[in-house]
Image (cartoon, rainbow, N blue to C red):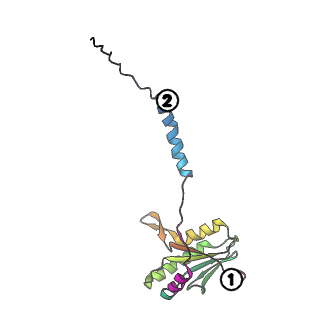
Amino acid sequence: MIKRRKAPLADAELDITSFMNLMIVLVPVLLLSLVFAQIRVLNIQLPALTEQLLQQEMEQPQQLELAIYPDRLRLNYPAGEPLRVFELTEQGKLDFAALSLYLQDLKLTFQQKNIEKQDITILAPDELDYQTLVTAMDTVRSFKAVVAADVIDAELFPLISLGELPQEEGAE
């Protein structure tokens, strides 16, 4: 029997110029689209159940609350007792800058008294717009501070709970 030998195949060259052209266009497009596709996650806590709420009040009756009204912000500590009221600014907007400064002082006071407070409840009406709620959450969560020539987010009250503003208080 005669054996036939196959002729050795010549090394084929890969033509990757079209692939390289695709990568040259695709990589910058993907890098630019990353900036627009950022997803932020805001962690919030659901309100406690009634039994757990009663138990928690017995253990820790000092709850910090921020009530958002259309014409003012009211900080309550302990819950229900007004600590400070922030009226509208001259531009007719809620004064989140003054709230942030006051919360920074309050956090420092808590630290000096060895009170470890990291939670706050935001009470908002049903008709509150989304941007105002997010601004309030960002304001109570942290503030910009300069440390060693770097701007960092310093922590205020990162554990945020949301609640509905009671109707009788909203009518005030």
Using the rendered view, name the quadrant where residue 72 is placed.
bottom right
Q: Where is residue 160 in the image (x, y as percent from the top left)?
A: 54, 73
Q: Residue at x 67, y 67 (%)?
A: 129
Q: Which residue is drawn at 48% across and 87% down?
A: 59
Left or right of 167? Residue 96 is left
Question: The C terminus appears in which quarter of the rendering?
Answer: bottom right
**In the image, what residue type sits under mark 2?**
Ser
Q: Which element carries disc 2, helix, strand or loop?
A: helix
For marks 1 and 2, the one nearer the N-term is 2
Q: Where is residue 64 in the image (x, y as percent from the top left)?
A: 55, 81
Q: Position of residue 51 (x, y in %)?
A: 54, 83
In magenta, the rendered stretch is 37-57
**In the image, what residue type sits under mark 1?**
Glu
Which residue lies most toward the bottom here?
A: 58
Which residue lies most toward the top here?
A: 2
Answer whether residue 54 is magenta in the image. yes
Mark 1–mark 2 CB contact (< 8 Å): no
Left or right of 95? Residue 13 is left
Q: Name the residue under label 1.
A: 169
Which residue lies most toward the front here?
A: 1
The one of 90 and 61 positioned closer to us in this rendering: 61
Q: Which element carries disc 1, helix, strand or loop?
A: helix
Distance, label 1 to label 2, CA atoms, is: 68 Å
The one of 29 and 145 positioned closer to us in this rendering: 29
Q: Position of residue 87 (x, y in %)?
A: 66, 78
Q: Residue at x 50, y 88 (%)?
A: 58
Q: Quick one: label 2, few (<14), some, or many (20+) residues within 10 Å?
A: few
Q: Name the residue under label 2.
A: 18
Q: Quick one: label 1, few (<14), some, or many (20+) residues within 10 Å?
A: few
